[in-house]
Amino acid sequence: MSLKQAADENPNFLLNDLRLSFKLCSAVTDTGINSLTSNFLRHLKHLKTLTLNFYECSDVSDQGLLSIGSTLSSHIKSLEKLSLDFGRCSQITGAGFEEFTSNISLQLSQLKHLDLSFSWCRKIGDQSLSAVGNTLGQNLKNIETLSFDFSR
């Protein structure tokens, strides 16, 4: 039985912590992320901790990032800890980053720990960082730990 089947067939399926790393997997694309979110992640309604690493997955763009954000904000409202690494994903833009953080900050009211790494994402600039800072500051009332990495 797959995890998706277990989640579909058992409403009490309680996976609390999920950690997936696709680091340096150049074959991972937005299509793969869309499949991961729509066929798997959206079924994990009781998830508390999610760690996803897409470091240097060069074919991942705003579309993949927004697919994750949409799934989290629509289906996994109980999330308390989110850690995402999109370092060196050069197709992610400031606009995509802003939309993603806006979606999660408005919908994930239980979020206590947020760790986002977008190191070497050169299309995310000062304007996006300022907008995101304002959005997160206004909407994440339960946040205890906030970590951003935009190193270059």
Image (tube, grey):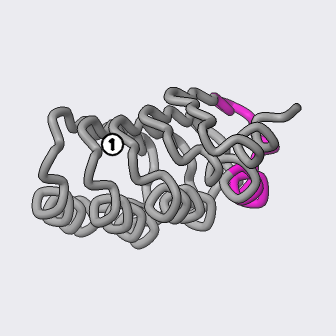
Looking at the picture, tell me which residue is in the foreground, 111 or 3.
3
At x 20%, y 68%, the residue is 131
- Above/below status of 147 relative to 64: above
- Amino acid at the residue labelled 1: Phe
Q: Name the residue under label 1.
A: 150
Q: In the rendered view, does 146 fall on the left or right side of 101?
A: left
Q: Where is residue 26 in the image (x, y as percent from the top left)?
A: 76, 40
Quarter location, residue 109: bottom left
Farthest right residue in view: 1
Q: In the rendered view, does 142 fall on the left or right side of 46?
A: left
Q: In the rendered view of the protein, which quadrant contains the C terminus?
A: top left
Q: How crowded is mark 1: few (under 14 residues within 10 Å), some or many (20 or more)?
A: some
Q: In the rendered view of the protein, which quadrant contains the N terminus?
A: top right
Total marks placed: 1
At x 57%, y 48%, the residue is 89
At x 69%, y 31%, the residue is 24
SS at circle 1: loop
Looking at the picture, tell me which residue is in the foreground, 89 or 100.
100
Whether 48 is among the magenta residues is no
Highlighted magenta segment, given as a residue range: 21-36
At x 27%, y 47%, the residue is 110
Q: Where is residue 125 in the image (x, y as percent from the top left)?
A: 31, 61
Q: Where is residue 100 in the image (x, y as percent from the top left)?
A: 41, 63
Whether 24 is among the magenta residues is yes
Looking at the picture, tell me which residue is in the foreground, 149 or 36.
36
